[in-house]
């Protein structure tokens, strides 16, 4: 498909490939390629290497360490990273809190937070979701009450991904309960070591604990850890969510999953039904990739933080295809995949690759159609914002 | 990366769309459907005047000298208006065969007349699986062809046919045949387009060009056909969604516009997804077809046809369903779009065959 | 699948098969088997033969000419009829107006209408749907105003199937506009030759005109052509619609379509993808057939006219499978099927069976998920009546 | 036509359901999942007391002398409660193999102990496609087996194994093996059930019964396994829909119970369709399995497994999706049902293989 790219773009992609496949340790990439989850150290190591080369936060403003790249270049950077099996930089740092601080934070916040955010010295968690506010994010109940030079925060966040690795959390909290629900929300930066913070892991169906509940019990947050203006947090959150117009399509994830299936499928590729399912998935993935390129092609006409309603389509179809790819791998590994090998269960002979991760990944990836705005919410957006229904 | 249209190409789309909005409303089209020829000679002349019939034809033969993109732009607009004139058989199929394989004299003879709207052609290629293949034998003054061709779009009105037939050396050949020298069974197809079955009995023919191996030319023009059909289908699906959304907004049931029912809104959203996926692949196919004829191009074009077929089934079914009974009526336009995309999905190979073929070729995404 | 039947039931099915394959003219059955539409004469002929053998209206009350059959026997009667390619009796006569007259009509209406309704001397049309009352049937606007010994009827019905063949129509008309919409409706029998009746055919996407609009312009209907009580028509309509608990599954239609596809498919059956689609359709059809039997098994516990909410499931899945079967036949006939052979378009050599009817039937059958309560309405019923949502 | 259950069978269902409601709530089960053996010896004894372990066993060996229907009734209830005890491997698989193929002495030795809950067994049948098949060679005192078996459900706790192995004459044989004489790699499966890979190295074995061809027995017990799995899956899917509907009624978003959103209601309706289709086929398979072992029975059982797999994918995906995040958590029951049905759909052949196999056998509906 790279014939749609210009020769400069193809060269850029080659440069990225060269960078990722030579500078990132082969051990980390090989493990990722085999379906293992990267460790905290793996992720930090990779982000630091990228950061040393100016490649950790290319989409930040140039004055904050970003690159003056086109949307397609940013896409190729992410794509080549995925195809080289490099664990991506911490999304909460580089795609979420970083751009918000860069666009709305004070010079003091810039100085203090942007460099360690880019270099992964600080690991951020996202504190948006709450138990009683799922798709209805703005109905959140966590409160922040000003008390002298601090806010006192009380409440509970949930689905906080990788909070067990995190040093800080950026939170939406209600600072004015008297106005319409979107109006009274502020955007706060909170040190997770503060007294009154409790993190409780949530075990998921795949056996892992990648998400957590985070409780705030009279947590005092210095008032200068407010980003931007008080009560404007909803605007910043929308900016943050509107920024990633094509990432949720997960083209790199799908392509590397399909590539892995093809590498491992062996005789299964001769089964016409299996192959037809795989081929159809490839066709729809290619269509989605082309849709991503169409969105990127017009992205330069949009200011940062303005969502493109077509992103809803990319998220919706992308997550469906990501999920379908996980299902095909189960068929490749067959009965060898039924045992929980994560618990140290071995076999008498070396297990085929994928046997340990096929089912857990399939289970885990059911999340994709739920998180980041459930696919039902995306259909609402499409029917209203695009079709005018 | 150049995905957008140039200003000239955008102008072309607008010009054609403006003409069709004025002159090709559903009632006009409806009347054409029942007319003897099934399409409008007057419109054909207008297309000629606009230069549409010379798209893809070299300037030295009176054409515009442009590529497949312009053809796709026109086909998409034709799809939105369900144009019945035989643009695909004459300009895209037969015209491109002549342009690619014809001798200088043949091009000189045929292409300017196509461009000026004076000559209709068609490509007689498809055969019944159960009948003997069409064969060509050399004769003193050229060739003689025998065999039967089916589903020849535009075959009812074409004056000159390009016919695919097996040569004695076992290779496929392309031949020019005077349509009047053949026997024809003309018919209307289910989408309103006209076509014919064509029988050749020792019929006088001339070889198209002088090349001995036209496999590559056939492949290229089949790819161009698929690119054109994909573009047309996208135009038709786009309009089907537009009609459906419009209907959802205007039709009331149980005291509310039915477009307020969440189930119908979400199904319209899924139609939009299907449409955009098809649009993306039609674009990819067009970009690929502008490139060299290799496995990558063939894979991209076939993949586009697969996606368009999948999308067309989904959108066609849902467009009719969401309209309810009115969607079933001949009087209301939506079913005509559904019928056209249904036929398109069965032209140039059905879905099972395309998926199997693409899979056997290794698919689109490399193992890694 | 007949191993689920008792030996008596199997014998009953054999008897029905023998009747249909010996008493019904082979010419009619052969044409139906080849996918041709039966003519008016074909239908009347078949119904008359059945009626002579007491087999046209087995589900009517015994005192009105019905048979004292179990639900499963009625099902086997319909199933064997379909498998023998016999055009079924006029559904408007035998399943709709007949049972309503039999249960709610006066003795005078019984005498006058039931015999010719059973014998197809009268062909009935159904006058329920109206242009502005699709799924919301009760919002109908046709009025019947009492004037002496007659009702004066004004209004318009639509989607009136085969009205071009019909002699009489049974109509819902509003007799009291002052009460809640379901309350003021009456059930009238109207002679289509009455002055003021106009029938306008509606051409459908397959090129045929099986449905019509019927206009009533000051049509005088004798008051004794009212069925039951005035303003109770909605009750009778619900009885009528609730009576057919399993017919909309169309098991016989699907099985005969699948059987025909298998007979015609030839080499296409060796295509693994085609065969897998066919096999999956067979599995789901068998599941549906078993669901039909489960509903029949408990049907004896229900009074006539009481709907079984599971019927919604049978209609929904049944119409989906009927439609899928029409799609497979298109693939069997290939490019030969693209021409409208109905318009006298011939070919140089005999056409493969199915070439003429595959696409028209596919187009026409899109109706199945729209009529008789659209599949969306069926999902409403299931979610409310069965799931309590 | 007899589709319903007898009063005795209904009583059996109620009895088992009542026991499990009392003694097998999600918290209890959750604790068992993490316990060393992974299931409850105490419950096993209760099943024995209720006579469940003797279902399908002849009365002369202490069993109930009933058929597959009773087993299906129990399995469906077990599915609703996600029972972890090794009923399927011991009672349905190994037990039925012994009952069908064992010698009188073997039955006498094994079946009463199974029935009383004193003996656990498992059938080691599945192998890795890439490893050499397990082989049996005769020895002076019986047989010696070598090979590797995988995904042996209940293989971790079974004391006696039935092992399928190739005999020197090329036919499959069934053998009894003391589990202690084998090497085992025990594990938890993704659905919480326990199993093992088992290695035989010239391991002492006794032929099960005296018959020389056990193909038919293997076929019959594989069919019984599928019938039991289909019933269990129906119970699990039934409960998943119940949980989902309950959640839709109780969870509020945007100020309304989410069950008032039409899209979610219609998707629940589609889940109901899938469930009832699976229930119907599980019933058909059970009725078929009570009949003679012929092509018709095999087709019905495989068709049921196909429908159950299709329904399980649909219902499992939707149950988790409609629950949102909570559906992903280990603490909330719905994902455990989803995991169990996911595993069931991968036992006894995957969907592609089942569909291809059934198609090659001619399907279910005759040509006509």
Image: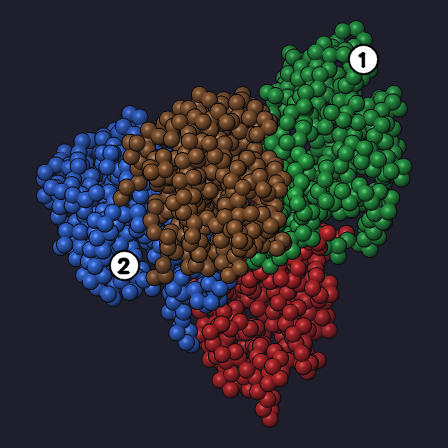
Chain colours: A green, B red, C blue, D brown
Q: Is residue A360 above or below residue C81?
A: above
Q: Is residue B186 above or below residue B339?
A: below
Q: Is residue C367 above or below residue B159?
A: above
Q: Residue at x 44, y 23 (%)?
A: D21
Q: For mark 1, does the 10 Å Cα neighbourhood hold few (<14), some (14 to 19), or many (20 or more) residues?
A: some
Q: Chain of mark 1?
A: A
**Left or right of residue B135, residue D79 in this image:** left
Q: Residue at x 44, y 45 (%)?
A: D97
Q: Which mark identifies residue A197?
A: none
Q: CA distance from mark 2 to mark 1?
A: 84 Å
Residue A321 or residue A352, whichever sits in front? A352
Circle 2 SS class: loop
Task: Report the number of numbered marks.
Answer: 2
**Left or right of residue C141, residue C113 in this image:** left
Q: For mark 2, does the 10 Å Cα neighbourhood hold few (<14), some (14 to 19), or many (20 or more) residues?
A: many
Q: Which residue is mark 2?
A: C84
**Left or right of residue A87, residue B130 in this image:** left
Specify the quadrant of the image occupied by residue C155. top left
Q: Which residue is mark 1?
A: A222
Q: Position of residue A59 (x, y in %)?
A: 81, 37
- Observer able to see residue D116: yes
Decide: marks 2, 1 in contact (CB < 8 A)?
A: no
Residue A91 or residue B70, whichever sits in front? A91
Q: Position of residue A296 (x, y in %)?
A: 73, 44
Circle 1 SS class: strand
- Observer able to see residue A16: no
């Amino acid at each position: 498909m790279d014939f749609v790219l210009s020769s400069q773009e193809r060269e850029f992609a080659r440069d990225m490939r060269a960078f990722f496949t030579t500078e990132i340790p082969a051990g980390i990439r090989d493990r990722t390629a085999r379906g293992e989850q990267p460790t905290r150290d793996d992720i930090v190591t990779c982000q630091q290497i990228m950061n040393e080369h100016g490649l950790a936060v290319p989409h930040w403003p140039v004055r904050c360490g970003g690159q003056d790249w086109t949307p397609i270049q940013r896409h190729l950077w992410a794509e080549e990273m995925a195809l080289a099996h490099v664990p991506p930089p911490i999304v909460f740092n580089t795609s979420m809190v970083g751009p918000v601080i860069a666009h709305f934070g004070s010079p003091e916040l810039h100085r203090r937070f942007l460099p360690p955010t880019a270099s992964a010295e600080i690991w951020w968690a996202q504190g948006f979701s709450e138990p009683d506010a799922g798709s209805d994010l703005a109905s959140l109940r966590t409160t922040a009450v000003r008390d002298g030079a601090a806010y006192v925060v009380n409440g509970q966040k949930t689905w906080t991904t990788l909070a067990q690795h995190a040093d800080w959390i950026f939170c939406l909290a209600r600072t004015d309960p008297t106005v319409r629900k979107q109006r009274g929300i502020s955007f706060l930066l909170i040190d997770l070591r503060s007294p009154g913070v409790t993190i409780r892991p949530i075990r998921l169906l795949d056996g892992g604990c990648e998400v957590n509940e985070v409780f705030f019990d009279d947590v005092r947050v210095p008032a200068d850890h407010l980003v931007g203006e008080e009560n404007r947090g909803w605007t910043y959150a929308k900016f943050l969510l509107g920024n990633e117009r094509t990432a949720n399509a997960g083209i790199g994830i799908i392509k590397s999953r399909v590539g892995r299936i093809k590498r491992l499928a062996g005789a299964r590729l001769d089964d016409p039904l299996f192959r037809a399912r795989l081929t159809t998935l490839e066709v729809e993935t290619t269509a989605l990739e082309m849709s991503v390129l169409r969105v990127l092609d017009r992205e330069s006409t949009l200011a940062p933080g303005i969502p493109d309603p077509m992103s809803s389509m990319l998220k919706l179809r992308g997550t469906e295809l990501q999920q379908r790819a996980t299902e095909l791998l189960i068929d490749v590994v067959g009965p060898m995949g039924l045992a929980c090998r994560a618990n140290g269960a071995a076999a008498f002979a070396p297990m085929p690759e994928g046997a340990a991760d096929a089912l857990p990944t399939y289970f885990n990836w059911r999340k994709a159609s739920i998180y980041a705005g459930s696919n039902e919410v995306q259909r609402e957006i499409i029917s209203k914002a695009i079709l005018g229904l | 990366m150049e995905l957008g249209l140039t200003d000239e190409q955008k102008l072309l789309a607008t010009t054609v769309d403006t003409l069709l909005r004025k002159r090709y409303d559903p009632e006009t089209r409806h009347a054409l459907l029942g007319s003897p020829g099934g399409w409008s000679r007057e419109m054909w002349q207008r297309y000629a005047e606009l230069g549409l019939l010379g798209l893809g034809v070299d300037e030295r033969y009176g054409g515009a000298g442009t590529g497949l993109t312009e053809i796709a732009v026109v086909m998409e607009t034709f799809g939105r208006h369900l144009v019945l004139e035989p643009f695909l058989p004459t300009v895209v199929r037969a015209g491109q065969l002549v342009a690619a394989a014809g001798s200088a004299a043949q091009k000189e003879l045929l292409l300017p007349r196509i461009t000026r709207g004076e000559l209709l052609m068609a490509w007689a290629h498809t055969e019944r699986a159960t009948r003997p293949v069409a064969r060509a034998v050399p004769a003193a003054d050229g060739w003689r062809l025998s065999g039967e061709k089916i589903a020849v779009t535009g075959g009812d009105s074409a004056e000159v046919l390009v016919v695919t037939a097996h040569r004695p050396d076992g290779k496929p050949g392309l031949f020019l045949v005077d349509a009047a020298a053949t026997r024809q069974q003309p018919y209307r197809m289910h989408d309103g387009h006209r076509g014919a079955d064509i029988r050749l009995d020792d019929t006088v023919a001339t070889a198209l060009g002088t090349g001995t191996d036209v496999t590559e030319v056939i492949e290229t023009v089949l790819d161009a056909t698929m690119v054109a059909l994909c573009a047309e289908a996208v135009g038709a699906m786009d309009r089907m969604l537009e009609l459906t959304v419009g209907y959802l907004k205007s039709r009331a049931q149980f005291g509310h516009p039915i477009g307020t029912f969440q189930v119908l809104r979400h199904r319209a959203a899924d139609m939009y997804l299907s449409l955009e996926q098809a649009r993306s692949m039609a674009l990819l196919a067009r970009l690929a077809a502008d490139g060299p004829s290799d496995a990558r191009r063939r894979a991209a074009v076939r993949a586009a046809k697969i996606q368009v077929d999948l999308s067309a089934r989904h959108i066609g079914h849902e467009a009719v369903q969401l309209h309810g009974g009115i969607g079933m009526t001949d009087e209301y336009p939506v079913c005509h779009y559904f019928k056209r995309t249904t036929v398109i999905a069965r032209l140039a190979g059905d879905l099972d065959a395309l998926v199997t073929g693409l899979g056997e070729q290794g698919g689109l995404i490399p193992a890694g």
